Protein backbone atom coordinates (compact mmCIF):
# COMPACT_ATOMS: atom_id res chain seq x y z
CA UNK A 1 0.00 0.00 0.00
CA UNK A 2 1.53 3.32 -1.02
CA UNK A 3 1.09 6.49 0.94
CA UNK A 4 1.30 9.84 -0.83
CA UNK A 5 4.02 12.17 0.38
CA UNK A 6 2.63 15.41 1.83
CA UNK A 7 3.58 18.68 0.13
CA UNK A 8 5.82 21.35 1.64
CA UNK A 9 2.91 23.21 3.27
CA UNK A 10 2.89 20.50 5.95
CA UNK A 11 6.33 21.78 6.95
CA UNK A 12 5.24 25.43 7.15
CA UNK A 13 5.68 26.71 3.58
CA UNK A 14 2.94 29.21 2.72
CA UNK A 15 2.25 27.31 -0.54
CA UNK A 16 3.50 24.51 -2.76
CA UNK A 17 4.31 25.28 -6.41
CA UNK A 18 3.00 21.78 -7.14
CA UNK A 19 4.18 19.13 -9.52
CA UNK A 20 6.36 20.49 -12.35
CA UNK A 21 4.92 20.57 -15.85
CA UNK A 22 7.20 18.74 -18.26
CA UNK A 23 7.60 19.64 -21.92
CA UNK A 24 9.67 17.51 -24.31
CA UNK A 25 12.65 19.55 -25.60
CA UNK A 26 14.24 16.97 -27.90
CA UNK A 27 14.70 13.35 -28.82
CA UNK A 28 18.21 11.97 -29.30
CA UNK A 29 19.62 8.84 -30.92
CA UNK A 30 23.17 8.37 -29.66
CA UNK A 31 25.29 5.90 -31.58
CA UNK A 32 27.83 4.13 -29.39
CA UNK A 33 30.91 2.04 -30.02
CA UNK A 34 31.97 -1.10 -28.17
CA UNK A 35 32.17 -0.65 -24.41
CA UNK A 36 35.40 -0.99 -22.48
CA UNK A 37 34.66 -2.48 -19.05
CA UNK A 38 36.52 -3.78 -16.03
CA UNK A 39 35.73 -4.80 -12.45
CA UNK A 40 37.18 -2.54 -9.78
CA UNK A 41 38.80 -3.42 -6.49
CA UNK A 42 35.77 -1.82 -4.78
CA UNK A 43 33.32 -4.43 -6.05
CA UNK A 44 31.76 -2.35 -8.81
CA UNK A 45 32.49 -2.20 -12.50
CA UNK A 46 33.64 0.68 -14.66
CA UNK A 47 32.65 1.18 -18.27
CA UNK A 48 33.15 3.71 -21.01
CA UNK A 49 30.75 3.78 -23.93
CA UNK A 50 32.27 5.92 -26.71
CA UNK A 51 29.74 8.12 -28.52
CA UNK A 52 30.43 7.85 -32.23
CA UNK A 53 27.58 9.90 -33.71
CA UNK A 54 23.83 10.18 -33.86
CA UNK A 55 21.03 12.63 -34.38
CA UNK A 56 18.68 14.86 -32.38
CA UNK A 57 15.40 16.58 -33.18
CA UNK A 58 13.67 19.36 -31.29
CA UNK A 59 10.83 21.78 -31.96
CA UNK A 60 12.00 23.56 -35.10
CA UNK A 61 15.56 22.26 -35.10
CA UNK A 62 17.69 19.22 -35.87
CA UNK A 63 21.22 18.30 -34.85
CA UNK A 64 24.01 15.86 -35.52
CA UNK A 65 25.69 14.18 -32.55
CA UNK A 66 29.42 14.59 -33.06
CA UNK A 67 31.84 11.72 -32.48
CA UNK A 68 34.25 12.02 -29.59
CA UNK A 69 32.02 12.09 -26.53
CA UNK A 70 31.52 9.26 -24.10
CA UNK A 71 29.33 7.87 -21.37
CA UNK A 72 31.40 7.06 -18.29
CA UNK A 73 29.51 4.55 -16.20
CA UNK A 74 29.74 2.63 -12.94
CA UNK A 75 28.15 -0.83 -12.93
CA UNK A 76 26.60 -1.69 -9.58
CA UNK A 77 26.17 -5.19 -8.15
CA UNK A 78 22.49 -5.33 -9.22
CA UNK A 79 23.40 -4.64 -12.87
CA UNK A 80 22.28 -1.01 -12.74
CA UNK A 81 24.58 1.55 -14.37
CA UNK A 82 25.21 5.01 -12.92
CA UNK A 83 25.92 7.06 -16.03
CA UNK A 84 27.57 10.35 -16.86
CA UNK A 85 27.62 11.23 -20.55
CA UNK A 86 29.25 14.25 -22.17
CA UNK A 87 29.14 14.97 -25.86
CA UNK A 88 28.60 17.68 -28.46
CA UNK A 89 25.87 18.16 -31.00
CA UNK A 90 25.87 20.57 -33.92
CA UNK A 91 22.49 22.13 -34.64
CA UNK A 92 21.42 22.53 -38.26
CA UNK A 93 22.21 26.29 -38.01
CA UNK A 94 25.81 25.45 -37.03
CA UNK A 95 25.42 26.11 -33.29
CA UNK A 96 27.50 23.79 -31.09
CA UNK A 97 25.82 22.50 -27.93
CA UNK A 98 27.49 20.52 -25.16
CA UNK A 99 25.24 17.91 -23.58
CA UNK A 100 25.86 16.61 -20.07
CA UNK A 101 23.50 13.88 -18.94
CA UNK A 102 23.80 11.86 -15.72
CA UNK A 103 21.57 9.36 -13.99
CA UNK A 104 20.81 5.65 -13.88
CA UNK A 105 20.10 2.92 -16.37
CA UNK A 106 18.18 -0.01 -14.90
CA UNK A 107 18.13 -3.49 -16.48
CA UNK A 108 14.72 -4.82 -17.55
CA UNK A 109 13.51 -8.41 -17.78
CA UNK A 110 13.69 -8.29 -21.60
CA UNK A 111 17.41 -7.35 -21.52
CA UNK A 112 16.88 -3.68 -22.33
CA UNK A 113 17.79 -0.79 -20.04
CA UNK A 114 15.49 2.07 -19.01
CA UNK A 115 16.89 5.24 -17.48
CA UNK A 116 16.12 8.50 -15.76
CA UNK A 117 18.59 11.35 -15.86
CA UNK A 118 19.19 15.02 -15.21
CA UNK A 119 20.69 16.97 -18.07
CA UNK A 120 22.30 20.29 -18.88
CA UNK A 121 22.88 21.92 -22.25
CA UNK A 122 25.68 24.45 -22.62
CA UNK A 123 24.80 26.80 -25.47
CA UNK A 124 26.50 29.94 -26.85
CA UNK A 125 24.73 33.29 -27.01
CA UNK A 126 22.29 33.53 -29.89
CA UNK A 127 18.96 32.22 -31.07
CA UNK A 128 19.26 28.91 -29.18
CA UNK A 129 20.59 30.31 -25.88
CA UNK A 130 17.26 29.54 -24.18
CA UNK A 131 18.18 25.84 -24.26
CA UNK A 132 20.92 26.53 -21.73
CA UNK A 133 18.48 28.11 -19.25
CA UNK A 134 16.25 25.05 -18.92
CA UNK A 135 16.01 22.61 -16.00
CA UNK A 136 16.11 19.28 -17.84
CA UNK A 137 15.24 15.71 -16.96
CA UNK A 138 15.78 12.80 -19.27
CA UNK A 139 14.40 9.41 -20.11
CA UNK A 140 16.63 6.86 -21.79
CA UNK A 141 16.14 3.53 -23.51
CA UNK A 142 18.78 1.03 -24.61
CA UNK A 143 17.12 -1.80 -26.58
CA UNK A 144 18.15 -5.36 -25.77
CA UNK A 145 18.82 -6.21 -29.42
CA UNK A 146 20.85 -3.12 -30.34
CA UNK A 147 24.22 -2.51 -28.68
CA UNK A 148 24.98 0.42 -31.01
CA UNK A 149 22.24 2.90 -30.05
CA UNK A 150 20.71 4.58 -27.02
CA UNK A 151 17.59 6.72 -27.28
CA UNK A 152 17.08 9.74 -25.04
CA UNK A 153 14.34 12.30 -24.53
CA UNK A 154 15.07 15.52 -22.67
CA UNK A 155 12.21 17.17 -20.79
CA UNK A 156 12.05 20.77 -19.55
CA UNK A 157 10.63 21.18 -16.03
CA UNK A 158 8.87 24.50 -16.41
CA UNK A 159 9.03 26.92 -13.47
Image: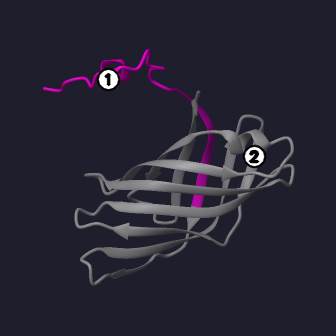
Which residue matches tag 2? 62
Query: Within the magenta stretch, is there residue 59?
Result: no
Furthest toward the front, the residue is 12
Task: State the image quarter where residue 55 is shown.
Answer: bottom right
Q: Nearer the viewer, residue 17 or 38?
A: 17
Quarter of the rendering occupied by the C terminus: top right
Query: Within the magenta stretch, is there residue 27?
Result: yes
Q: Can you give x and y, in whole percent of width and height, for residue 12 in the image?
A: 35, 20
Q: Is residue 109 above or below residue 68?
A: above
Residue 124 horizontal side relative to residue 118, left or right? right
Q: Nearer the viewer, residue 54 or 23?
A: 23
Which residue matches tag 1? 11
Q: Can you give x and y, in whole percent of width and height, for residue 50 in the image?
A: 56, 72
Query: Residue at coordinates 59% horizontally, 39% vertically from top-left?
Result: 135
Task: State the image quarter where residue 157 is shown.
Answer: top right
What secondary structure is found at the residue carrying circle 2? strand
Q: Which residues are magenta?
A: 1-30
Query: Residue at coordinates 59% horizontally, 34% vertically from top-left?
Result: 24
Amino acid sequence: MSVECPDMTTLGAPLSPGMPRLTRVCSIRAEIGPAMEFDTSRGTGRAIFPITGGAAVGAGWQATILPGGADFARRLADGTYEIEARYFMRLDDGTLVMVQNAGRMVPQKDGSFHGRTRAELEVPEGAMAHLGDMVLFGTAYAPSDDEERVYIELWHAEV
